[in-house]
């Protein structure tokens, strides 16, 4: 199996007529993902890559009631309304690629989603991929077949570019991936490391997980509690970037929006806390795949 | 974006919080006249910096005459406060303080909603207050009002939401002897991603937390991502640093990993720069040109992971446009892969050949961190 995607995944693309939306639709179709409909207000009745376009999520959902995943390709100022529309129509998985969504808008959507048990991945998430099943978004890009193949390593990354890079390191080590998720680099993460580790724990295909983390924020510390409570028991290797940032002033922001220099939340402190509960620590991200290899 | 105290206070005041009467002076202002204009006997003179414990670092002075105020201002403008540049000085009335409290709202990343933090022990760092003296109230951004009778809480809640703050902190929140609640300090961080609904943010002065005025290059780079297509790829990140290796990194995560890798091989970055999200050629060109304009460079490291959708050919052409103009003589190491990588690498190689550049090119077969070592080796031979 895998997590987040399976053979029942049916995808709606919101913002399908835009450049990014079209490219993502193409990427998903090329990889065998079932994209069944798109939305763009005012362009209902048109088609993009043979996928029918509707004026609203409600119209699309009426025609295709089996839609369970929406990929959001709209500009940041339209993201809140788009996500809200998906939530109102009870779409279970919402992947938001839009970057630079205001924190308040993200918090608004997360509060709504929580009430309906809807999972938001992102914002600023390029998507996720389960080799052999499909992908949401553009993870892997055109080189997807060179980089991804089914296997037993799960991977999570704060960074989009590093998501692909990590998967490539796994492949180069002679291994394959179960599911690879770009969680996005925002201050508020719709789906956190801890959320995904719980799913990987239940997933038979996944034998070991690797993570690309960053300085700033508390999400890596949630992993410590998860392991202590035995909600995650499989091997885990992590790389945490941003050691250089410890010399920068508090409150400074380097890299992603969530990567803020904060006392007690640097790369070193995170590594220490995780190492104490048995997580394998990589000095460079390239070591992650090697650390995972004996368990894969 | 972190605000100076005086900017934060203006915002708090707009939402109905009382702030001390005061005014702001800059280098070259008539400080004595400012004191006279304020028209109070006892004044507090406060250095305006982006962070820092000002009280413990001699950045706050108490003055009772025009002459004292002038001297205090001169002194504050001549120092740095915990490596922070003093951009301005605020002179304000000294209050008759009865009590000092603490009040802030920020996002709790665990609950993914705002949290209001209150303590009757204000005036010191909240980290130094014991947990049993801190009250926390979780709220939901969809609430119009916050359920709290803490003085100033409603006003701060509206301020936090309507001004798209990441942090809004009043410490101390003072109760005066005559019973008024006054925000004596203000620490506000704005969420820059909400800029599209805050036209007025564009008027805020340029700033950096690097302990100096922002450089011309930093100001110029910031402009690259402004305008209607601000969200179409990012190329507006540049922080000038002390080293001599220019860097052009792709992606937030790769940039962090590469900064670590560069320091690990004993090299020092001349800048921190990251472009990502498939920015157009023109944006990358402007960025590369500014990065390469720093004097005293000894090397250039262009590095990124295996891109998902960033067009390597398009973004490389932006860099090539800059290299064609500047023709650097120092070593250049490139590591990149992703869509249209063959095209991008071919164009980059041709650029190296026609300009006789000392350039080494690597694709995804070579790990990113290894190319930092290669840069170090090229510099040592």
Image (cartoon, helix red, strand yellow):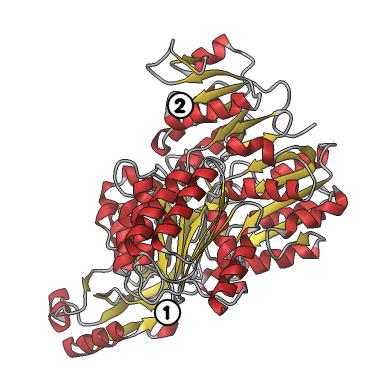
Q: Nearer the viewer, residue B123 or B292?
A: B292
Per the image, label 1 sits on a secondary structure element best described as: loop
Q: Which mark is residue B198?
A: none
- Quadrant for the N terminus of chain B, please: bottom left
- Say which residue appears at 63% left-offset and 47% top-offset: A163
Q: Is residue A73 above or below residue B136?
A: above
Instruction: In the rendered view, tell whether residue A170 sits above or below residue A39.
Output: below
Q: CA distance from mark 1 to mark 2?
A: 46 Å
Q: Farthest right residue? A: A294
- Side of B213 relative to B379 (left or right): left
Where residue B154 sits in the image (x, y, percent)? 40, 50
The residue under label 1 is: B83
Q: Tag 2, which secondary structure? A: loop
Please provide percent x and percent y for residue A261.
Answer: 53, 65
Chain letter of the residue beneath label 1 in the structure image: B
The residue at which mark 2 appears reads as A15
Callout 1 touching callout 2 (CB < 8 Å): no
Q: Residue at x 70, y 43 (%)?
A: A195
Q: Residue at x 34, y 60 (%)?
A: B289
Estimate how packed mark 1 is, as few (under 14), some (14 to 19) or many (20 or more) residues with alpha carbons within 10 Å.
Answer: some
Asked if residue A9 lies left or right of residue B54, the reply is right
Q: Is residue B150 left or right of residue A274?
A: left
At which x and y percent is residue B353?
A: 44, 58
Whether residue B278 is visible: no
Label 2 resides on the chain identified as A
**Quick check: B276 left or right of B47?**
right
């Amino acid at each position: 199996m895998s997590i987040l995607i399976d053979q029942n995944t049916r995808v709606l693309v919101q913002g399908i007529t835009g450049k990014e939306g079209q490219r993502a639709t193409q990427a998903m179709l090329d990889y065998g993902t079932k994209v069944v409909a798109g939305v763009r207000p005012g362009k209902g009745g048109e088609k993009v890559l043979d996928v029918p376009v509707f004026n609203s999520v409600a119209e699309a959902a009426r025609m295709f009631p089996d839609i369970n995943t929406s990929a959001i390709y709209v500009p940041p100022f339209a993201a809140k309304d788009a996500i809200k529309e998906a939530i109102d129509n009870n779409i279970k998985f919402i992947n938001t690629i839009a970057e630079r969504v205001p924190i308040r808008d993200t918090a608004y959507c997360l509060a709504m989603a929580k009430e309906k048990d809807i999972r938001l991945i992102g914002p600023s998430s390029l998507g996720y991929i389960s080799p052999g099943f499909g992908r949401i978004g553009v993870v892997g890009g055109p080189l997807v077949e060179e980089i991804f193949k089914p296997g037993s390593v799960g991977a999570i990354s704060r960074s989009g570019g590093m998501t692909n890079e990590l998967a490539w390191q796994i492949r180069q080590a002679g291994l394959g991936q179960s599911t690879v998720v770009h969680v996005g680099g925002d201050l508020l993460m719709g789906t956190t490391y801890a959320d995904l580790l719980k799913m990987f724990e239940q997933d038979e295909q996944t034998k070991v997980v690797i993570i690309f983390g960053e300085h700033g924020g508390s999400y890596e510390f949630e992993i410590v509690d998860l392991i202590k409570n035995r909600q995650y028991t499989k091997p885990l290797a992590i790389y945490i970037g941003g050691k250089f940032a410890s010399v920068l002033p508090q409150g400074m922001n380097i890299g992603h929006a969530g990567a803020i220099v904060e006392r007690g939340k640097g790369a070193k402190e995170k590594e220490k806390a995780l190492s104490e509960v048995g997580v394998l620590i990589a000095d460079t991200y390239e070591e992650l795949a090697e650390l995972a290899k004996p368990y894969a | 974006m972190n605000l100076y105290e005086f900017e934060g206070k203006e915002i708090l005041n707009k939402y109905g919080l009382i702030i001390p009467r005061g005014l702001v002076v800059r280098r070259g202002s008539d400080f004595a006249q400012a004191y006279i204009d304020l028209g109070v006997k006892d004044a507090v003179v406060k250095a305006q910096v982006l962070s820092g414990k000002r009280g413990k670092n001699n950045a706050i002075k108490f003055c009772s005459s025009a002459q004292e105020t002038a001297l205090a201002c001169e002194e504050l403008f001549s120092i740095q406060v915990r490596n922070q540049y003093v951009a301005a000085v605020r002179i304000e009335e000294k209050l008759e303080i009865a009590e000092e409290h603490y009040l802030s709202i920020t996002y709790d990343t665990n609950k993914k909603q705002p949290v209001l933090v209150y303590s009757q022990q204000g005036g010191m760092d909240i980290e130094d207050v014991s947990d049993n003296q801190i009250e926390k109230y979780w709220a939901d951004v969809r609430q119009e009002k916050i359920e709290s009778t803490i003085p100033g809480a409603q006003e701060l809640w509206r301020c936090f939401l309507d001004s798209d703050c990441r942090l809004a902190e009043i410490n101390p929140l003072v109760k005066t002897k005559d019973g008024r609640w006054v925000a004596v300090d203000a620490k506000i961080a704005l969420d820059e991603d909400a800029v599209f609904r805050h036209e007025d943010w564009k008027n805020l002065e340029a700033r950096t937390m690097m302990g100096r005025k922002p450089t011309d290059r930093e100001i110029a780079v910031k402009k690259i991502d402004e305008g209607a297509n601000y969200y179409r790829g990012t190329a507006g990140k540049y922080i000038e640093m002390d080293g001599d290796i220019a860097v052009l990194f792709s992606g937030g995560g790769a940039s962090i990993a590469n900064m670590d890798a560069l320091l690990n091989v004993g090299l020092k970055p001349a800048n921190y720069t990251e472009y990502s999200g498939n920015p157009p050629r023109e944006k990358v060109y402007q960025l590369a040109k500014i990065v390469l304009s720093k004097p005293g460079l000894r090397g250039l490291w262009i590095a990124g992971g295996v891109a998902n959708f960033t067009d390597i050919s398009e973004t490389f052409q932006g860099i090539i446009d800059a290299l064609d103009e500047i023709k650097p003589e120092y070593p250049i190491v490139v590591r990149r892969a992703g869509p249209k990588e063959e095209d991008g690498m071919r164009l980059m190689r041709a650029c190296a050949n026609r300009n006789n550049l000392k350039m080494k090119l690597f694709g995804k077969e070579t790990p990113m961190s290894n190319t930092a070592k290669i840069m170090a080796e090229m510099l040592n031979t």
